[in-house]
Amino acid sequence: MQKIDEVLKDVKSVAMSGHIRPDGDAIGSALAVYNYIKDNYPQIKADVYMDEIPPVYDFMHRAGEIKNDRPDGLKYDLFIALDCGDLNRLGQSAKYFESAQKTLCIDHHISNKNFAQINYIYPDASSACQLVYKVLDEDKVTKEIAECLYTGMVTDSGIFQYSSTTSETMNIAGKLMDTGIDFNAIVDRVWNLKTYAQNRVLGKCLSDSRLYLDGRLIVSYITAEEMKKYGVTHQDFEGISSSLRNTEGVKVAAFLNEMEDGSFKISLRSNGANVAEIAALYGGGGHVRAAGASAFGRIEDIVENLVKNTEKVLDV
């Protein structure tokens, strides 16, 4: 892995983005790189583009500078894709990737097909933020950058509980802590703190969940109409699939929520099964323990099909 300082040589403009519907790792990794460039390369025009981020992440340095609008006609010397498994997952930012003179992808999705010119793809890493730390000059990692990286590592590793957590993960986390970040406050804010609406909808989804395949699969879903009733948006569902997975005997947990176009987003979590294989059957992808996809149709039909596809993977 080259240090990012090498990649930035002779670069006059750079854009970066994470995946659509960004989570803590996508936001943290993008803002960490953005802050690094802004702090150390003031001569480079740097822009970070992303969909609207959940308010829980707006404490990170320069989060207010994330651009949601992506006008046509802009071209950059370098585009950096972070925590993104394929070009389509960049959403509206993909046009800047395609027109850039040079492209770099830093990612840990097992489904990544090396779609950039320079690819740092390590599926065994806990998070994109863990990889970003390794391409930065450690001496230039400020407290503000460390906050961004620690946030992404915490959210994607389940507070260092998931199997992707290694000694390297913990060593890097320790170095980030040494910068003086309030690591307890970060965990409390991004993992524990929930709004009243989020707690209500979590209760609803747990209560309405159903077991299939002799208790190996648990499924819950919410429709657009129910979202209105509970006063929630797609940003309020983080953690629901993980909560479903915590059910005794469950190998695969699936949470489905209806999107604006009528499709259902499928969030998959596992206790040992390879849910990336299930997601791939829908054209999706992700990690062995956490993956996602989308499907159109009646929710009852989607769930029935999901049960069949999960059974195929579990019985292999």
Image (spheres, rainbow, N blue to C red):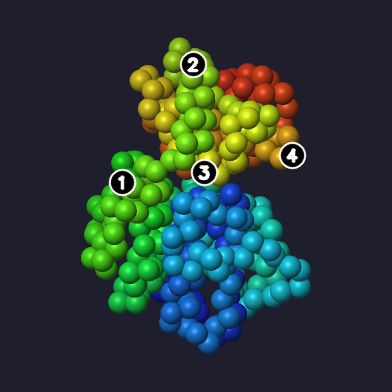
Q: Which amino acid does label 2 sit on?
A: Leu
Secondary structure found at label 4: loop
CB atoms at circles 3 and 4 under 8 Å apart? Answer: no
Residue at 34% x, 41% y: name it. 162
Residue 96 at what x, y percent from top left? 67, 67
Compare marks 3 and 1 and give the one earlier in the sequence. Answer: 1
Residue 177 seen from this side:
yes
**Residue toward you, 240 or 253:** 240
Q: Which amino acid does label 1 sit on?
A: Phe
Secondary structure found at label 1: loop
Which residue is identified by label 4? 261
Q: Which mark is residue 286?
A: 3
Residue at 31% x, 41% y: name it. 161
Residue at 74% x, 39% y: name it. 261
Labels 2, 3: front one: 2
Compare marks 2 and 1 and give the one earlier in the sequence. Answer: 1
Q: Which amino acid does label 4 sit on?
A: Asp
Compare marks 2 and 3 and give the one earlier in the sequence. Answer: 2
Q: Which mark is residue 211?
A: 2
Residue 170 at what x, y percent from top left? 26, 54
Compare marks 3 and 4 and give the one earlier in the sequence. Answer: 4
Q: Is residue 259 left or right of residue 150?
A: right
Q: In this view, does 159 lie above or below 281?
A: below
